[in-house]
Amino acid sequence: MPRTSTDSNDVTTSTTEPEPFIPIAEPLLTGNELAYVTDCVKSSWVSSIGKYIPRFEEDFARFCNTKHGIATSNGTTALHLALVVSGIGQGDEVIIPTLTFVATANAITYTGAKPVFADSESRTWNLDPVDVKRKITPRTKAIIPVHLYGHPVDMDAINQIANEHQLAVIEDAAEAHGAEYKGRRVGGLGRIAAFSFYGNKIITTGEGGMLTTDDDELAEKARWLRDHGMSTTERYWHPVIGYNYRLTNLQAALGVAQMERVEEFISRKRALAELYRSELKNVPGITLPPEESWAKSVYWMYSILVGDEFGVTRDALMEHLKARGIDSRPFFHPIHTLPPYLNSQSLPVAERVARQGINLPSAVSLTDRSAQRVADAIREARR
Ligand SMILES: *Cc1c(COP(=O)(O)O)cnc(C)c1O
């Protein structure tokens, strides 16, 4: 059986019949991806002009129920651009959850502003609105809620705080394409939102990103700055310092093909979550991922917490899975514990969740049988 993941070490199982390696994630590219990419190559439209770019932007905006979609080179540049068009810069503070991928903080740092870290809620593992309130200072300009591992943030609470203090709300929806908050899709729940299409995300363009917004002015500014801020009336006249954050037609071709199957991908993620839930719900010491009554999670990464009662540590469980050919990931380190952002504050919920959390194999191509194997291996680790 060929290996399906390229980013983990070879694993030899001690069982008699070798079972296929189960990757944490892998893209599914078996639809029109090859046909559309071939079309780009044959027509020679391989750079950042071509029909697939506006098509991908329109398809994605429609999917999010937003007026605009602005494709970018990746999710980090989408976040950076969202901050720039929101007027965030030197001397400003932006509140984010400490429990997120480092790109959320880095995008803020690129603008000269300072990321301020808030704790997580123990129910949803997402940004805690109570702690957000405590972190507001006269310098605070924006909040970036992150829909972690596919579960939406309680956006009414965040938007209320933002309204009271006149702060911009920028959604980091990189892990949550299609997730719903009170029946509304993420991407249209704040002023502007950023998505990622990295290889392990819900849909992929290899590398890629997207901004979504209903705001005409922000959209226009983002399109302009994405392309070096060139004057629309005079060629090579650049009144500001812009960026090259463009997506290519080749990447957008992948995106259009992926969008044809996005609902199917989300259904599969949710079916896998249901399978994992029914298999793991009675295992002592295992906390299952949240799904609040007002939420539809897309379970980007099916994630569990390993508590003391499990009897085996989180890291030992990951080793146990690895020895059985099953890939997994620890949760992100809270960003306030990383060298560039190190500070002495204590954010106890995020620290505990980060210490106990594991992402389980969550590829849309994962079979029921493989998910069953993962669940069996977890239960077996206790003995
Ligand atoms: C993946 C991710 C990003 C960054 O996306 P890239 O496309 O890798 O730049 C940002 N925020 C979160 C929460 C992510 O998971």
Image (spheres, rainbow, N blue to C red):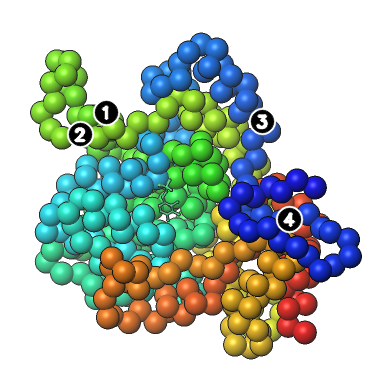
Mark 3 crowdedness (10 Å alpha carbons): few <14, some 14-19, many ≥20:
few
Q: Is residue 111 visible?
A: yes
Q: CA distance from mark 4 to mark 2?
A: 44 Å
Residue drawn at (19%, 29%) of the image: 229
- In this rendering, which labeled residue sits more in front, label 1 or label 4? 4
Secondary structure beneath disc 4? loop
The residue under label 1 is which amino acid type? Asp
Do we see residue 282 in this rendering? no
**Mark sitting earlier along the chain (2/3):** 3
Residue on which disc 1 sits? 227
State the image coordinates of residue 211 (x, y, percent, origin top left).
36, 40
Please state which amino acid type lies under the numbered disc 3.
Gly
Q: Amino acid at mark 2?
A: Gly
State the CA–CA distance, disc 1 to disc 4.
42 Å
- How many numbered discs, if any? 4
Q: Secondary structure at mark 1?
A: loop
What residue type is disc 4 on?
Phe
Task: Give left or right: position of 381 versus 102.
Answer: right
Decide which of 228, 137 is in the foreground and name it.
228
Name the residue beneath numbered marker 4: 21
Q: Which residue is mark 3?
A: 31
Q: Could you tell which of marks 1 and 4 lies nearer the N-terminus?
A: 4
Alpha carbon distance from label 3 to label 4: 24 Å
Measured in 3D between alpha carbons, the distance from the residue under mark 2 to the one under mark 3, in whole angstroms, is 36 Å
The disc placed on residue 242 is 2
Residue 96: horizontal and vertical position, in percent? 31, 63
Mark 2 and mark 1 in contact (Cβ < 8 Å)?
yes
Residue 110, relative to residue 204: is it above or below?
Answer: below
Q: Callout 3: helix, strand or loop? A: loop
